[in-house]
Amino acid sequence: MMNATPPAETLFCRRDEVGNIVGITQESLSADQMIAEHWQAVSSSDEQVRQFLSGDTDHVNLLSQTDVGLARVLEDLIDVLITRGILQFTDLPQAAQAKLLERRQSRASLSNRLQLMPMEEENGLL
């Protein structure tokens, strides 16, 4: 039977279908949360926990490796929907608006920094 109040140094982890750790939290969880959300108590000294936290496993970041690309796809999709009048920017939640504006400003800033000098017409050199 699961201990309802694990020691303070205990972490909670979720595992995938083959038993690899896919998430870790230090939050206090009730027994009901642990069961419903499939968390299990683990020790911080557990080898799999240490590997997960150090990023020393191949499976740890499989989804996060695609997150950046997917974020760009979603930004572009939102821009297309807004341009076509299907979506209004103000229809989005405030938090989403703020994130999109922050990303646009960051991309614009980076774009300005990455501008190459014009090429010389005679020899094509920078």
Image (cartoon, rainbow, N blue to C red):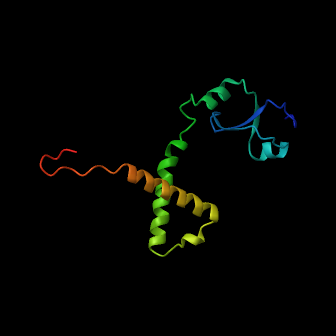
On the image, the x and y values in percent for residue 67 come to: 52, 48
Q: 72 above or below 6?
A: below
Q: Is residue 48 visible?
A: yes
Q: Is residue 65 shown left or right of residue 42?
A: left
> Can you tell which quarter of the image residue 22 is in?
top right
User: Is 87 drawn above or below residue 103 in the view shown?
Assistant: below
Residue 112 or residue 91, whichever sits in front: 112
| Pick the front one: 21 or 100 | 100
The location of residue 35, given as percent across then percent down, is 79, 43
Query: Which part of the image, by quadrant, shows the N terminus?
Result: top right
Does the rendering let one see residue 63? no
What residue is at 54 percent from the left and 73 percent from the top?
A: 88
The answer to which quarter of the image holds residue 15 is: top right
Residue shown at the point (83%, 46%) measured from the top left:
32
Q: Can you give x and y, in whole percent of width and height, for residue 124 in the image?
A: 16, 47
Look at the image and tell me in which quarter the C terminus lies: top left
Task: Report the label total.
Answer: 0
Where is residue 102? Give x, y as percent.
54, 57
Horizontal side of 6 relative to 126 (left or right) equals: right
Task: Pick out the residue farthest to the left.
Answer: 122
Residue at 51%, 56% in the rendered image: 103
What residue appears at the point 67 percent right and 29 percent down from the top-left corner? 49
The answer to whether 94 is drawn above or below residue 9 in the figure is below
Q: Residue furthest bottom?
A: 85
Q: Nearer the viewer, residue 108 or 44?
A: 108
